């Protein structure tokens, strides 16, 4: 992770959950331009999945039990 990205991420951690979600959606919208190049999209997803796996392996992101996530998703669908 570059210093600039680390600084932005650190600032993002100070935001409330709603603001973090809004920021994430805006960043994803910026990446929509990549949809014209499937190779670039695949590369970006691979990088993101690698980052997430590293966060999980380091304990930075502990996740939630599948049963909890499943129940929450099913409740939203009802």
Image: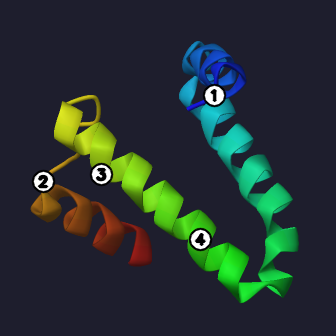
Q: Quadrant of residue 43?
A: bottom right
The nearer-to-camera label among 3 and 2 is 3
For marks 2 and 4, the one nearer the N-term is 4
How dense is the environment of label 3, judged by Cα within 10 Å: few (below 14), some, or many (20 and up)?
few
Residue 76 picture location, percent across and down: 41, 68
Residue at the spot of label 1? 2
Position in image of residue 72 (x %, y %): 29, 61
Q: Which residue is mark 3?
A: 53
What's the CA distance linking mark 1 and mark 4? Answer: 18 Å
Q: Which residue is mark 4?
A: 43
Q: Residue at x 24, y 43 (%)?
A: 56
Tell me which corner region of the image, top left, top right, bottom left or bottom right, holds residue 63: top left
Crowding around mark 1 (Cα neighbors within 10 Å: few <14, some 14 to 19, many 20+) is few
In front: label 4 or label 3: 4
Q: CA distance from mark 3 to mark 1?
A: 18 Å
Q: Quadrant of the C terminus?
A: bottom left
């Amino acid at each position: 992770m570059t210093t600039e990205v680390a600084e932005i991420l650190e600032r993002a951690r100070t935001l409330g959950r709603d603001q973090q979600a809004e920021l994430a959606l805006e960043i994803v919208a910026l990446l929509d331009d990549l949809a014209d190049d499937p190779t670039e999209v695949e590369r970006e997803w691979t990088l993101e999945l690698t980052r997430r796996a590293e966060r999980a392996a380091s304990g930075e992101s502990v996740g939630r039990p599948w049963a909890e996530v499943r129940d929450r998703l099913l409740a939203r669908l009802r």
